[in-house]
Amino acid sequence: MFYVSIKLLVAGGTIDKQYDELTGNVIFAQTHIPELLTQARCTAPVTIETVFLKDSLDMTLEDRQALYIQANLAQEDKILITHGTDTMGETARYLGERHLQKTIVLLGAMIPYCFKQSDSLFNLGFALASVQCLPHGVYVAMNGQVFTWDNVVKNKLKGVFERG
Amino acid sequence: MFYVSIKLLVAGGTIDKQYDELTGNVIFAQTHIPELLTQARCTAPVTIETVFLKDSLDMTLEDRQALYIQANLAQEDKILITHGTDTMGETARYLGERHLQKTIVLLGAMIPYCFKQSDSLFNLGFALASVQCLPHGVYVAMNGQVFTWDNVVKNKLKGVFERG
Amino acid sequence: MFYVSIKLLVAGGTIDKQYDELTGNVIFAQTHIPELLTQARCTAPVTIETVFLKDSLDMTLEDRQALYIQANLAQEDKILITHGTDTMGETARYLGERHLQKTIVLLGAMIPYCFKQSDSLFNLGFALASVQCLPHGVYVAMNGQVFTWDNVVKNKLKGVFERG
Amino acid sequence: MFYVSIKLLVAGGTIDKQYDELTGNVIFAQTHIPELLTQARCTAPVTIETVFLKDSLDMTLEDRQALYIQANLAQEDKILITHGTDTMGETARYLGERHLQKTIVLLGAMIPYCFKQSDSLFNLGFALASVQCLPHGVYVAMNGQVFTWDNVVKNKLKGVFERG
């Protein structure tokens, strides 16, 4: 009953940041999601599509529209979106207000996958189960908890998501 | 609605294996689950209890009874069990046939947490969402999929769980 | 014959960069050198002193003077300096022209210690052997090679050190 | 003056141990030394030759003869040998008593490269500098120190090498 196709839309965010040796900064080059799924030994049918790779502070209304369009166009009714944490709540709200008949789960990370102490793998696992189990709606899955789109805020001081 | 207490029973398995420098083998010394939850930045209320640390090939009927008793005694109705993969199906069946009015999710790993390429964090995240979302019953959560206790088998050649 | 005290002067550089969750950038907070030496299981007598933590592009003449003064003041005649790679050659030249009767070895990294793929541990090991074995003089130890202060340049396109 | 060819003879030992998912034990499958040199961004000319992959407790006189023969046959006069720590001292003595006109440095690790907390990269860096700098002779390079073949013993309780 759980073996259903899942679409994973890549929107960037901390998960995919990597170190640029030329500049000494963290940048986006390509998504690492396929590596994460390999390390996870995931056999669930996940199709990955990179919509864009952005710091979520740089996301525009057009970017959110693009995510909505891709989620809507997808054959699958189970949609994961990897996304920066800073405006994850805004994107969740944007999508939630459009009431797609799909289960959409947004996830991100506080530490990039390339770092030893990354929370990426945990968060991807957590979101992948959430998207398979939850009813239609839009959710944020972070810190080992599921939040509905209309009741979530990032506590920027603590670096964790909370209800509110 | 998802903010509920979870009991995590530690039974050992690959997740918790570590390298013993004296003998050059992998052994059990103590559970690493608290470290995983810290790396995960998990804020869900998880209470950890080590029942035992065993290779699941060494588990006895008494061990399975002990897990049943602890699951039953627990205040929480959401129970995670970290467990070796080799006999995870047997323990799931043992627990499933007892029809506790709880959601019990078993998880494990193919590569210990101490290894760079471990699937532990992903699997813990996946199971933690599963236990919060699923109805009462006993499940195996591995490879990014949820299996019911009466329909799961480990394919030992491929090292993955399948229906059957 | 090799058991001699070594002074390690920390000047920052890529080794010590870490991820800042608040800003999403890499920053300096504190040196990770003690962690590296612990992971290395080093029993050689190394005394660590943080002179400053800087990107080497931000280093001034005063910073180089400070390193010279600390190297000169040190009881030890074997001095390691962890340093950013971009101006490591300049600092090596500055120190080399002052002809201290000491063995001074500069080292750095292309990828911070906090990243999975870091070259930091290798470079620290390489430099620690170099400083114990080499005669008085100033050297850059990078890429598994020792360079003298008057014959080293960073090839910024390739990200490696070369003679020249 | 330091840019000289180096032969690295692989004899196994902890560095190259990896996790076997089928048995749950650590085993030898293939050497990881090329991966280490890539992570190290080493540009020194190192030629790798796998002589065998063994736990050093299983090494025989024939194995030590094979290492001697390969060291002798090598064009290079700078020889690294990756080796298990338990009998590294015996192999060093065997080679040292044969007085080859070469610099031979043995190295190993307490924790395999596949583990997060491995000392392998540090030890390889340390040994690679040692073999380039030291005069002819046979040495053990471990714990950030160089030991001569006739004055080294592994303290098995502490898991470190000492003079004696």
Image (cartoon, coloured by chain):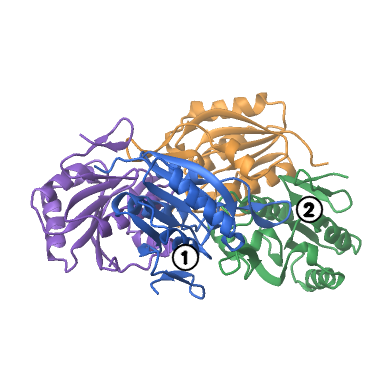
Chain colours: A purple, B blue, C orange, D green
Residue in the image at 42% along x and 52% along y: B124
Count neighbours of disc 1 (C-alpha within 10 A) and say few if under 14, some if 14 to 19, many if 20 or more. Answer: many
- Residue A90 lies in what quarter of the image? top left
Dot 2: chain letter: D
Residue highlighted by disc 1? B89
Q: Is residue B53 above or below residue D23?
A: above
Q: Secondary structure at mark 1?
A: helix
Q: Is residue B80 above or below residue D16?
A: above
Can residue C155 be spotted in the picture? Answer: no
Dot 1: chain letter: B
Q: Position of residue D150 (x, y in %)?
A: 89, 52
Specify whether disc 1 shares its chain with disc 2.
Answer: no
Tell me the CA gap for discs 1 and 2: 48 Å
Residue in the image at 50% along x and 39% along y: C16
Foreground: disc 1 or disc 2: 1
Residue highlighted by disc 2? D140
Which residue is farthest front? B98
Q: Position of residue C29 (x, y in %)?
A: 45, 32
Quadrant of the image containing the C terminus of chain A: top left
Count neighbours of disc 2 (C-alpha within 10 A) and say few if under 14, some if 14 to 19, many if 20 or more. Answer: many
Numbered circles on residues, count: 2
